[in-house]
Amino acid sequence: MSKLFSKFLGVFRYRNLVGVDKAGNRYFTRTEKLDGVVKEKRWVIFKGEEDPTSIPVEWICWLNGQRKKAPTPQEMIELEARRERVKLNAALLKKEEEMKSTSSRPKPQSIGKVESPDLESFIQQFRRGSIDHDKGMAHDDVADIVDGNKDDKDKERSSEPTGSGESFKPGTWQPPM
């Protein structure tokens, strides 16, 4: 029992204050000898409510043993200033991006009668002949229908390309209708 009591008193008697953070949390250390091995214990005593999210990253690293030395007040001031600069730069970049996106957007066109595209020249790229505006058909197709050759022409076309390549002309192959 006395051993347990002395260990309990040792927790409070042999602790060393290492530092205090911006929120007022206090950080302590103590060295213990367990089974012949000297270990350093590190812990925090929160000011007010125990909120682990209030601990700065540098102190978390020290508590977990990822840092050998505790962060100094000067280091904490420099890191806080750096974080503020990063926030300001991020806000400036966001503002610049918004400015670029609003200036590069196309201006809305007036809602009025808009000239229709030239469909005749567009279709001529894909078919032979010109468009019969009354029927919406190419003249060659109209002639084939009048002569009765439309069905024969469709039978001649196949979905598979044929030939040896000697007579190849780019843009002449038409898909079956």
Image (cartoon, rainbow, N blue to C red):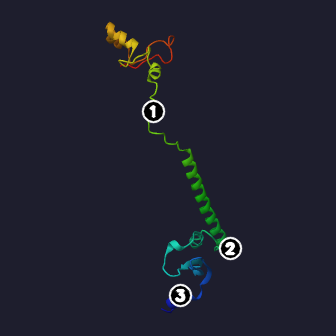
Q: Is 9 placed above or below 122 here?
A: below
User: Which mark identifies residue 77?
Assistant: none
Tag 1 secondary structure: loop
Type of amino acid at the residue the image marks with label 2? Gln
The mark found on residue 7 in the picture is 3
**Toward which corner of the image does residue 142 lie, by quadrant?**
top left
Q: Secondary structure at mark 2?
A: helix
Whole-angstrom CA distance, mark 1 to mark 3, is 90 Å
88 or 37, nearer to the observer: 88
Q: Residue at x 58, y 48 (%)?
A: 100
Check disc 1: other Cα within 10 Å, few if <14, some if 14-19, many if 20+.
Answer: few
Seen at 58% across and 59% down, the residue is: 91
Q: 7 or 55: which is nearer to us?
A: 55
Q: Earlier in the sequence, mark 1 or mark 3?
A: 3
Nearer-N-terminus badge (1/2)? 2
Confirm whether residue 152 shows in the render: no
Looking at this view, name the residue that lies furthest to the right. 74
Determine the CA span between mark 3 and mark 2: 35 Å
Which residue in the protein does label 1 denote? 114
Lateral position of residue 122 relative to residue 44, left or right: left
The front one of 160 and 37 is 160
Point out the frontmost of discs 3 and 2: 2
The C terminus lies in which quarter of the figure?
top left
Residue 98 image position (x, y, % from top left): 55, 52
How far apart are the two marked residues, 1 and 2, measured between alpha carbons?
67 Å
The answer to whether 114 appears left or right of 67 in the picture is left
Please tell me whether residue 170 is drawn above or below residue 5 in the rendered image: above
Whichever of callouts 3 and 2 sits on the residue coming sooner in the sequence is 3
Q: Which residue is mark 2?
A: 74
| Quarter of the figure with residue 34 | bottom right
